[in-house]
Amino acid sequence: MAAGLLITDADERILLVEPVYKAEWEIPGGCVEADESPLQAVIRECREELGLGLSPGRLLVVDWVPAQDGRTEGVMVIYDGGTLDPTATKRIVVPPGELKGWAWSDPLQAGQRLRPLLARRIAEALHARADGCCHYLEDGVRVT
């Protein structure tokens, strides 16, 4: 299980992070550890990856991902990380051993930087934020 945060700026750009250990960009977040809830995990990961103590908002999407390419099936959730103002953005500090950096990306740029599955999940999270619902996905595609 993994949890992530959809964080945007006033221009609706999405905050993406660039891990050192893989080529693809991600949203802030990561794997849920033993005896940790998804909400606790995303709060911890936000502190570790961005140096920010954010209080996540509501759950936006739950995405069940089938097993593939030697990986087991999984459940991925995305919480609303809110909108960062310029003051909060200046406080971002990335750990050099974990991230190369971060960037604001409009939806088109995000679609180019992210794996297709994560791009679909983020697009659905943006829709869920806009319509006030939580969307259930399977492999990044809305089911309900």
Image (spheres, grey):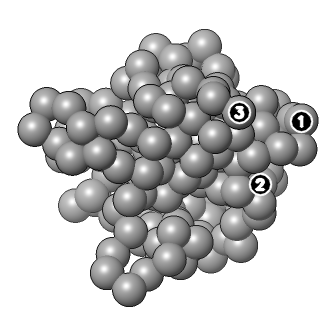
Q: Which residue is mark 2?
A: 82
Which label number is shown at residue 11? Answer: none
**Residue 18 coordinates in the image, percent (x, y):** 36, 41
Foreground pick, 46 / 121 = 121
* Amino acid type shown at disc 1: Asp
Of pointers 1 and 3, the one earlier in the residue sequence: 1
Q: Position of residue 67 (x, y in %)?
A: 24, 38
Specify which label sits upstream in the sequence, 3 or 2: 2
Residue sitting at x 63%, y 29%: 143
Q: CA distance from mark 3 to mark 2?
A: 23 Å
Task: Tell me the crowding category of disc 1: few under 14, some 14 to 19, or many 20 or more residues within 10 angstroms, Cα based.
Answer: few
Left or right: 52 as drawn, with respect to 128: left
Instruction: Please state which amino acid type lies under the numbered disc 3.
Output: Thr
Q: What SS does tag 2 mark? A: strand
Image coords of residue 87 (percent x, y): 76, 60
Which quarter of the rendering shows the N terminus? Answer: bottom left
Q: Is residue 17 left or right of residue 90?
A: left
Q: Is residue 24 above or below residue 30?
A: above
Amino acid beneath label 2: Gly
Give the number of the mark in front: 1 or 3. 3
- The residue pinned by badge 3 equals 144
Instruction: Report the residue at 42% width, 19% height from top.
Output: 116
Q: Nearer the viewer, mark 1 or mark 2?
A: 1
Viewer-proximal residue among 77 and 41 = 77
In the picture of the structure, the residue carrying the numbered disc 1 is 131
| Quadrant (top left, top right, bottom left, bottom right) of the C terminus | top right
* Farthest residue, direction bottom: 35
The location of residue 131, given as percent across then percent down, is 89, 35
Residue at mark 1 to residue at mark 3: CA–CA distance: 13 Å
